[in-house]
Amino acid sequence: MIHSTGQDWLDAPEKRVMLFGMSGLGKTHVASMLRAAGTWFHYSVDYRIGTRYMGELIADDFKRHAMQVPLLRELLMSDSVRIRSNITFHNLAPLSTYLGKPGDPARGGLAFADYMARQNQHRAAEIAALADTAPFIERARRIYGYRHFVCDTSGSICEVVDPDDPHDPLLEQLSALMLPVWIRGTEAHTAALIRRFDAAPKPMYYQPAFLDAAWRDYGREHPGPVDPDAFVRWTYARALAHRQPRYAAMARRGVIVEADEIAAIGSAGDFVRLIARAIDRKTPGGA
């Protein structure tokens, strides 16, 4: 780790953390709180994916749909309207809508090959956005004067790196720059996330091998045209279980804070003190 003790972290003139874990446990909430304190730069990996790396893909998909409407087609062909996504740190709907869900086109699904192509686009974009962290740390310092930096990662970060490889190049680069912080949920948190997802299933990124196996297994259990929402609901709980050991392996490079601890903090100062305690309670040789 880049900090050996809690006091070392507290004394550091520049604090840099990389938050990771399941979506919905507080990464963006904490990052926004730190940004609001005025001394932290908030780098959102999902925002970078949806703007820098997939923004044109998203806008082009919107345009393809608009071209099916005669009025909009006429306006687009005469360059009279502009169509673009409006992604924010808290609204990533354009990105998730573009990723889509596989299944029956009559129910809004994508052909599995098209779905996998979009998944691969996301994978490449996420890797590139994570690699951009280093130059953004420098830009935040040089242009804006921010001394502290929080990297708000996607829930799928554990799928685009090899957490068990001690020499994974991307993880090596990131952990040399920042302190990795796993926001770990309990079984109750997982159950709540699953209930929330069941109520409003949304597209997400999956590791290719995991997704391919899930698609085959679901097809065997549910023959016939695939209901896209039913498939992603069926897959979500399995994805969370698949990710847990991968997050745990990533945490060997950093520290663990519990989701309930994150929910209890009310200021940037609370967060800084929580990280100091997490460093001090880490046992030698592992998380």
Image (cartoon, grey):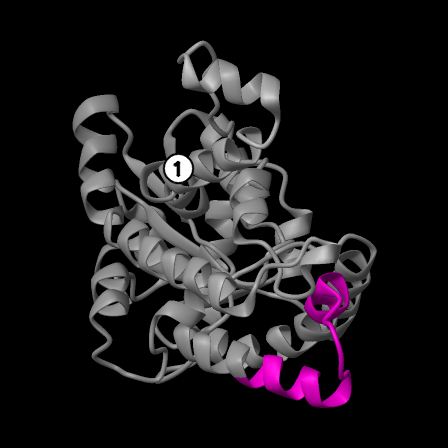
Q: Tell me the magenta residue range.
A: 213-233
Total numbered badges shown on the rendered structure: 1
Residue 223 part of the magenta segment: yes
Q: Is 218 colored magenta in this rendering?
A: yes
x and y percent of residue 43 in the render?
38, 40
Q: Residue at x 27, y 60 (%)?
A: 174
Quadrant assignment, res 240: bottom right
Name the spot of residue 229 as percent of width and height, x first: 74, 62
Q: Which residue is located at x 30 percent, y 47 percent?
A: 11
Give whichever of 148, 276 is nearer the camera.
Answer: 148
| Prevailing secondary structure class for the magenta stretch in the rendered image | helix
Please tell me whether residue 99 is drawn above or below residue 42 in the rendered image: below
Residue 233 lies, with reference to residue 54, above or below; the image says below
Q: Please state which of residues 274 and 171 is positioned toward the viewer in this rendering.
A: 171
User: Does residue 74 lie above or below 207 as drawn?
Assistant: above
x and y percentages locating residue 148 in the rendered image = 32, 38
> Which residue is nearer to you in this view: 104 or 141?
104
Residue 123 vs residue 21: left or right?
Answer: left
Is 161 left or right of 110, judged from the image as shown? left
Dot 1, how many residues are within 10 Å of its Cα: few (below 14), some (14-19), or many (20+)?
Answer: some
